[in-house]
Image (cartoon, rainbow, N blue to C red):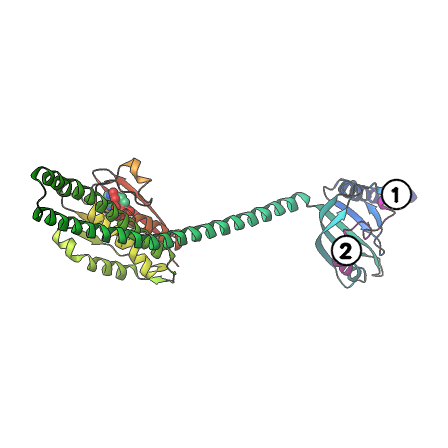
């Protein structure tokens, strides 16, 4: 009987030792810092990981309080909660804070404190878990810095863009008046030359001299005047186009829900005459709504449809098809034609200002520049698929809402 009692006692003792060992193992080998802190904030038990985080030995920590090595700015938030916890009025709390390591470096940690009570519910110590989050904080800091940089660059870019657009606006506006003057004065010059011719004919200049003067007046000067007129006309045309671009791209945007079926019907009605005259087969399939400025989006589709008409292949009946669908929160529309198409090497350039495939054509080469700029301003996009000799398909994406 006595023997078996001792045997039982031994088993209980063994179990106790085993659980004590397990507890120590967990405490010592945990990958996070674990400590027990008394009511004054002194570290009464710490594991090795905590020593590694703070750079102090166990011995050194047992002589200081957590308050002493907390970064002063972070102390009030921790201390006010610690006091409430130790009074038994709070079960646990967590916070991010900085400790000053023994080598003077700051270390960011995530601290969780809970309360250990004794058998009569009196506060004994705080169990504190400490995780080193320096790498996370450094990443956060880098991210914030990058976000600031991105924001700053975007603002600078926006400012430069606006500045540039204002310069274009002013330049195209102001340059027009001297150009108009040159056009007017070359007309005057032509009239003066005609007068001169009449006077020479009426005067009695010798035949030989008269012939020479007449060659200059009839051939040389008119030819030169015609070059001046052509050049000033094309400068005038370019300035008008620039002015048009700057007016359109600087226009205020009033984004609303747009019934695109109604809008497209409107645009097609405006081009009805040319569609009928050229016997173009135009089909519009049901289109989804989108969020955009009605006036500006009308300008976009007016340009695309007019181009589809303008660049049809005269050797075959023209077909234009307009479709739309929704994908990833965007309404995607396509304007497809069976016209002359665009060679691959030209495709990347056609959205550039004044770019035309046929430089002899009387067109302005600004329509697609306006289309792209307007769509960018309305959070949209434009791109194309085209095959030379077969046709083109222009896509427009705009937010659904
Ligand atoms: P513009 O039509 O006034 O020349 P755009 O900027 O609208 O100016 O178009 C630029 C060039 O792209 C046009 O000159 C034309 O060569 C080409 N292009 C545009 N749309 C089409 C189309 N649907 N089919 C073939 N070529 C096109």
Which residue is tagged 1?
A: 4
Q: Quadrant of ligand 1?
A: top left
Which residue sits at x=40%, y=54%? 166
Q: Looking at the image, which is closer to me, 70 or 312?
A: 312
Q: Nearer the viewer, mark 2 or mark 1?
A: 2
Q: Residue at x 12, y 53 (%)?
A: 277
Quadrant of the frame with the C terminus: bottom left
* Quarter occupied by the N terminus: top right
Furthest toward the right, the residue is 2
In the rendered view, tell whether residue 109 sits above or below residue 255.
above
Q: Residue furthest top?
A: 345
Disc tally is 2
Q: Is residue 56 visible?
A: yes
Q: Secondary structure at mark 2?
A: helix
Numbered mark located on residue 75 in the image? 2
The spot of residue 35 in percent (x, y) is 79, 48
Taking depth in this image into account, of 327 and 100 the one nearest to the observer is 100
Query: Where on the picture, by quarter, is residue 377?
Result: bottom left
Q: Is 63 colored magenta in this rendering? A: yes
The x and y percentages for residue 188 are 20, 52
Q: Is residue 11 visible?
A: no
**Which disc, if any, is residue 86?**
none
Q: Earlier in the sequence, mark 2 or mark 1?
A: 1
Q: Which residues are magenta?
A: 61-81
């Amino acid at each position: 009987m006595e023997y078996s009692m001792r045997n039982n006692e031994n088993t209980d003792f063994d179990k106790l030792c085993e659980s004590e060992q397990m507890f120590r193992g967990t405490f010592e080998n945990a990958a996070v810092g674990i400590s027990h802190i008394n009511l004054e904030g002194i570290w009464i038990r710490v594991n090795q990981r905590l020593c590694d985080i703070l750079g102090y030995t166990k011995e050194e920590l047992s002589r200081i309080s957590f308050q002493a090595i907390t970064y002063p700015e972070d102390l009030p938030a921790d201390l006010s909660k610690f006091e409430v916890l130790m009074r038994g009025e709070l079960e646990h709390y967590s916070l991010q804070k900085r400790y000053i390591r023994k080598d003077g470096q700051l270390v960011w940690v995530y601290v969780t404190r809970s309360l250990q009570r004794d058998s009569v519910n009196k506060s004994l110590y705080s169990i504190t878990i400490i995780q080193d989050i320096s790498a996370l904080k450094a990443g956060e800091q880098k991210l914030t810095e990058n976000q600031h940089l991105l924001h700053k660059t975007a603002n600078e870019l926006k400012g430069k863009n606006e500045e540039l657009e204002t310069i274009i606006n002013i330049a195209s506006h102001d340059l027009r008046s001297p150009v108009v003057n040159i056009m007017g004065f070359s007309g005057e010059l032509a009239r003066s030359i005609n007068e001169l011719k009449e006077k020479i004919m009426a005067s009695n200049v010798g035949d030989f001299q008269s012939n020479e003067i007449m060659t200059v007046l009839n051939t040389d000067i008119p030819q030169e005047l015609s070059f001046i007129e052509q050049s000033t006309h094309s400068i005038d045309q370019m300035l008008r186009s620039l002015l048009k671009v700057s007016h359109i791209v600087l226009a205020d945007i009033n984004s609303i829900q747009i019934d695109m079926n109604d809008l497209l019907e409107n645009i097609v009605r405006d081009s009805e005459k040319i569609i009928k005259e050229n016997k173009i087969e135009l089909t519009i399939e049901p289109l989804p709504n989108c969020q955009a400025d009605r006036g500006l989006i009308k300008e976009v589709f007016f340009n695309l449809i007019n181009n589809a008409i303008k660049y049809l292949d005269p050797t075959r009946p023209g077909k234009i098809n307009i479709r739309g669908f929704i994908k990833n929160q965007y309404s995607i529309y396509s304007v497809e034609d069976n016209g002359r198409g665009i060679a691959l090497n030209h495709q990347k350039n056609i959205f550039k200002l004044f770019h035309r495939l046929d430089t002899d054509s009387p067109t302005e080469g600004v329509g697609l520049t306006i289309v792209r700029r307007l769509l960018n301003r309305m959070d949209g996009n434009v791109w194309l698929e085209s095959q030379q000799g077969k046709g083109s398909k222009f896509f427009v994406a705009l937010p659904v809402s």
